[in-house]
Image (spheres, coloured by chain):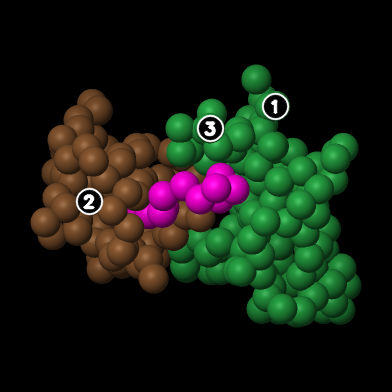
Chain colours: A green, B brown
Amino acid sequence: NAGVMQNPRHLVRRRGQEARLRCSPMKGHSHVYWYRQLPEEGLKFMVYLQKENIIDESGMPKERFSAEFPKEGPSILRIQQVVRGDSAAYFCASSPPFRESNNEQFFGPGTRLTVL
Amino acid sequence: AQKVTQAQTEISVVEKEDVTLDCVYETRDTTYYLFWYKQPPSGELVFLIRRNSFDEQNEISGRYSWNFQKSTSSFNFTITASQVVDSAVYFCALSEAWMDTGFQKLVFGTGTRLLVSP
């Protein structure tokens, strides 16, 4: 059973470009979380999604950031018009439906975004 | 609001020394979960332990042990006989109880960087 997969592992963008980060949850997992880790900081919650629904996006910046988790395919975190301050590691985590989850989130290896 | 404090930014020890990483948390929930994760230089997050608020028994796993004390809102992590491979950033995290949607947000501390030298 493959773990949570994220790609790309490293992404370099110039200011003003778009960044798309992909997350494939573990098989059977229907819940996806995105976290951001700024340099030398802990992880901060961004958004929680279930299939086709955004449940909580209280940690998402109000502008330029969006997330989706379509019925088919990976979850996508999209950052439009990137700025240098967006440089960070973005981690995805997944969990099964909550009655089965035993309260554990499984983390992917992260995508390191560098904005030049 | 929930909060996790890891006051030690960086700790340096020599191999074979014991080291304790502190974690203090704040929450209004009566049911909550505490976690420790390891982030080695390669950057991934490695799950170490999960503990729920009703279980105050200390836990030992090999050279690792955890001391959970609700009275002081602390969940400290001790590595016995440290090794160079233990060098990493260690994060303590807290999650609130389940909501009907299954939402369970993790709140992380800022991490403690552990450097173990030979």
At x 61% / y 34%, what residue is drawn? A97
Q: Where does label 1 land, which residue?
A: A27
Q: Does B54 sit above or below residue B70?
A: above
Considering depth in this image, is A77 or B71 the residue closer to the camera? B71
Mark 2 → mark 3, Cα distance in angstroms: 26 Å
| Left or right placement of residue B32 versus residue B7 in this view | right
In terms of secondary structure, what is the magenta stretch mainly?
A: loop
Q: What residue lies at 70% left-to-right and 27% top-to-bottom?
A: A27
Decide which of A25, B99 is in the foreground and name it: B99
The nearer-to-camera label among 1 and 3 is 3
Q: Is residue A92 above or below residue A20?
A: above
Q: Chain of mark 1?
A: A
Element type at mark 2: strand
Image coords of residue A3 (percent x, y): 63, 30
Chain at numbered mark 3 = A
Q: Which residue is mark 3?
A: A99
Which badge, 1 or 3, comes first in the chain's sequence?
A: 1
Q: Give, as a single range, the part of the protein colored magenta.
A: B92-104
Please report contact status of discs 2 and 3: CB closer than 8 Å, yes or no.
no
Residue type indicated by callout 3: Arg
Give residue A60's position: percent from left, percent from top. 66, 70
Q: Specify the quadrant of the image occupied by residue B113.
A: bottom left
Whether B97 is among the magenta residues is yes
- Asked if marks 2 and 1 touch (Cβ < 8 Å), the reply is no
